Amino acid sequence: MPKRDIYHNTVRKALEKDNWIITDDPLKLKIGEKRLYVDIGAESIISAEKDKEKIAVEIKSFVGKSDVNDLEQALGQFFLYYKVISVQKLDHRLYLAVNEITFHDIFTKPIGQLLLADPIFRLIVFDEEKEVITQWIPN
């Protein structure tokens, strides 16, 4: 299994504070002989009929030497996981989780806005100190 991101426990706590039940840590995917691991799988009751919404969350810290390299790696993982989840017809919606600093440094700029315009791409923004989710994009 891959090494956990430095914000793994922070995002897990933030999801729990937001009334998500962690069901998988990590969420295991398999395609052919390859095994993939999305950082967290979670579910939440979303209506009076007790329907459940399921999410998969890939957490990225963006602490490398280059924001662009970190972004390329994060997007590669995100879209690979998205395709595997789609092909396997899992009912999880995939999100990339980043802290507020990364959000402001990347996703408020043209390169980030380009990604946020894609209907496939979903983002969770979290406050690392308070361990809370501050934004779900799209909402």
Image (cartoon, rainbow, N blue to C red):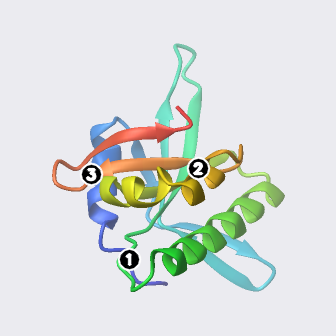
Q: Earlier in the sequence, mark 3 or mark 2?
A: 3
- 10 Å crowding of disc 1: few (<14), some (14-19), many (20+): few
Give percent across and percent down for residue 16: 31, 44
Query: Hey, what amino acid is under mark 1?
Result: Arg
* Residue drawn at the location 60% of the way across and 75% of the way down: 72
The residue furthest top is: 48
Q: Which residue is mark 2?
A: 113
Up the image or down, 138 lies above or below 109; here it is: above
Question: The residue under label 2 is which amino acid type?
Answer: Gln
Q: At 62% across and 68% down in the image, what residue appears?
A: 75
Residue 92: x and y in percent read: 63, 48
- Report how far apart the C-alphas of labels 3 and 1 lie in the structure: 15 Å
Q: Please identify, in this view, whether the residue under mark 1 or under mark 2 is nearer the observer.
A: 2
Vertical position of residue 64 compared to residue 129: above or below: below
Kind of residue at disc 3:
Lys
- Spatial CA distance of label 3 from label 2 is 28 Å
| Residue 123 x %, y % | 51, 49
Front residue of this view, candidates 29 and 125: 125
Q: Quadrant of residue 86?
A: bottom right
The answer to whether the residue labelled 1 contacts the one labelled 2, judged by CB atoms less than 8 Å apart, is no
Residue carrying label 1: 4
Q: Residue at x 81, y 80 (%)?
A: 32
> Is 101 placed above or below 18 here?
below
Tag nearer the camera, 3 or 2 = 2
Look at 16% across and 54% down and name the residue there: 129
Residue lying at the far front in this picture: please name it.
110
Q: Secondary structure at mark 3?
A: helix
- State the SS at label 2: helix
- Sequence order check: which comes first, mark 3 or mark 1? 1
The number of discs equals 3
Mark number for residue 13? 3
